[in-house]
Amino acid sequence: MSYDLIVIGGGPGGCSTAITAARAGAHVLLLESGRYPRHRVCGEFVSAESLALLSELLSSDNHEMVNSAPRISRSRVFTDGGPLHLPIEPAAASIPRFDLDRTLWHSCLEAGVDARQGHQVRYFHGNGPFTVNANGERFAAKSLVNAAGRWSFLTSSAIRDRASEERWIGVKAHFVEKNPSPTVDLYFCEGGYCGVQPVSAPTTNGGTRTVNACAMFRADVATDLPNIFAAHPALCERAANWQIATEPVRTSPLIFHKPEPVQGTMLQVGDAATFVDPFIGDGISLALRSGALASKCLAGFLQGSRTLVESAALYEQFYTRNLAPVFRASSMLRILLRVPSIIRRPAMSLLQRTPALTRQIVRMTR
């Protein structure tokens, strides 16, 4: 069967691509190797910049997920000394990936996307048109988008060669906490960090809420949540009274690299283009925005007004101009957080005394 567009990967980036293209009249095939709903390692923070786009992508009967999601208007960063308070203006939303992925997938079906779960793509051929093999079936398409995440058979050899470097893992679980702070809290220590934020509204039974604890750590320091919690005194004290609500999920490798929006004429969205530091809280936003951007750049090709090569170049240009700055800002902050504490303490003290500077740093990551 032949399509205008095949999208590999049914996460936020892939669904955003598929929905945008299908609503513009394209015949779209979306191939997802797993099955929804399921838990994913994710901070589950949806920045305000993408909430309007998310609402547009969702079918009308799923808008309540966005409307009822807890809002996060402040962040607390625990490093050296007391916490650094950062404003989040406008407020972000906290949406579990379990719910987000399920509703986006449903919205793909509503938009007319041929969306297939349990379809593991083994290989593809061509540079436009393309032939894709999944579960022994062959599919043809005029264009191809890689939304398979930061690590798959589609990952370029240049990034694969970096897998032998310092190994980082991601771990996440939900816990029940009584009266948690309505903030996104980031606990940094030697070896990594853990983010905690509410992902449910308060209950009437004592004000308990579900919180998401999502960590990124060096594998030689800690590989499970109990050891990660123990690495930071304030987090260890806080987590002592938690009750686990979901089984932990893990992922690796986590490799930082410069954005790679295209490979040849295959467009790449979300983590497939680049893995942005999770503490920035813009991963879901970048996935949604890059997916919509990829579809819009391909529209001219599918309508016959430009070549596929021109569409890929246009996407790379727009991505570099509008989305890549978030990656550069997160890279600079990662350097600050990994320098010796004797250097980091004065910098964090300066930020605590200058709210205008902290607001500027937050704006740099959006």
Image (tube, rainbow, N blue to C red):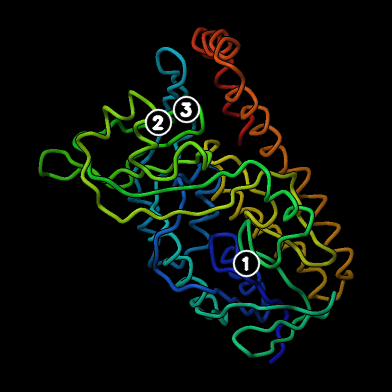
Q: Is residue 361 above or below residue 228?
A: above
Which amino acid lies under the numbered mark 2 shown in the image of this protein? Asp
Q: CA distance from mark 1 to mark 3?
A: 38 Å
Residue 328 screen position, x and y as percent: 71, 35
**250 relative position to 157: left or right:** left
Which secondary structure, mark 1? helix
Front-lying residue, 333 or 16 = 333
Q: Quadrant of residue 211?
A: top left
Residue 202 screen position, x and y as percent: 21, 42
At a point 42% along the width and 29% down the height, the residue shown is: 187
Q: Is residue 216 above or below residue 299?
A: above
Q: CA distance from mark 2 to mark 1?
A: 33 Å
Front-lying residue, 106 or 350 = 350
Q: Residues within 10 Å of mark 3 (few under 14, many from 20)?
A: many
Residue lying furthest left in this view?
Answer: 205
User: If you read the primary sequence from the N terminus, does the residue marked by circle 1 or circle 3 appear first?
Assistant: 1
Q: Which residue is mark 2?
A: 185
In the rendered image, which quarter contains the C terminus? top right
Which secondary structure, mark 2? strand
Residue lying furthest front in this view?
Answer: 220
Q: Which residue is mark 1?
A: 20
At a point 38% along the width and 67% down the height, the residue shown is: 61
Q: Residues within 10 Å of mark 1 (few under 14, many from 20)?
A: many
Q: Which residue is mark 3?
A: 188
Q: Are marks 2 and 1 in contact (CB under 8 Å)?
A: no
Q: Is residue 12 above or below residue 366?
A: below
Residue 299 screen position, x and y as percent: 76, 69
Residue 249 screen position, x and y as percent: 40, 55
Q: Are marks 3 and 2 in contact (CB under 8 Å)?
A: no
Tell me the tag on residue 73.
none
At a point 75% along the width and 82% down the height, the residue shown is: 141
